[in-house]
Amino acid sequence: MQVYCENKDTDERPHFFLDVSPKGSTEPKFTFAGDVEKLAGDMKAIGEGNQENVFEALSADSWSSPKEIAHHISMSDSTVTKHLAKLLQAGRIECRGKTRNVQYRALFA
């Protein structure tokens, strides 16, 4: 899939188009897919929802590794790790250990 962004002088917001041409076709056929700001907002909302899923998978009573969390919520290890870092920075979770032995648990007020 290819994405093409366009912004004309008369446009207030840039728009993006998706390449939907058949595989092997020499003629690209782009279709309007929306504006870039809406796409960014949608992606942020999805990310925040996933972050909440990671948080909800944690317990205040027991420690969990990123791999256990990823398996529990059917998400990739790297995505879970990214969300855990944001939750840790926000002070919503705590961790112990380092690298391969790191474990996390939720902090409930």
Image (cartoon, rainbow, N blue to C red):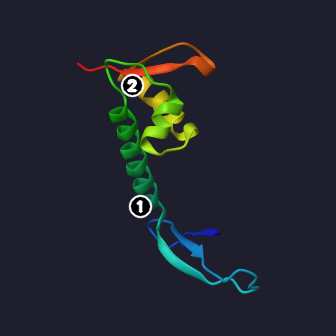
Q: Residue furthest top?
A: 97
In-front residue for pair 71/8 = 71
Q: How many marks?
A: 2
Q: CA distance from mark 2 to mark 1?
A: 26 Å
Expressed as whole percent of the image width and height from the top left, the position of residue 54 reads 40, 36
Specify which label sits upstream in the sequence, 2 or 1.
Answer: 1
Expressed as whole percent of the image width and height from the top left, the position of residue 78 reads 58, 38
State the residue at coordinates (48%, 73%): 33
Residue 10 seen by the camera = no
State the residue at coordinates (53%, 32%): 67
Check the image and report above or below for 66 versus 31: above
State the residue at coordinates (43%, 39%): 72
**Quarter-of-image position of residue 76:** top right
State the residue at coordinates (45%, 60%): 39
**Quarter-of-image position of residue 4:** bottom right
Q: Residues within 10 Å of mark 2 (few under 14, many from 20)?
A: few
Residue 41 seen by the camera = yes
Q: Do callouts 2 and 1 mark residues in contact (Cβ within 8 Å)?
A: no
Dot label at residue 38? 1
Q: Secondary structure at mark 1?
A: helix
In-front residue for pair 16/7 = 16
Name the quadrant of the C terminus. top left
Check the image and report above or below for 32 versus 66: below
Name the quadrant of the N terminus. bottom right
Amino acid type at mark 2: Ala
Dot label at residue 90? 2
Is 77 on the left or on the right of 106, as rendered?
right
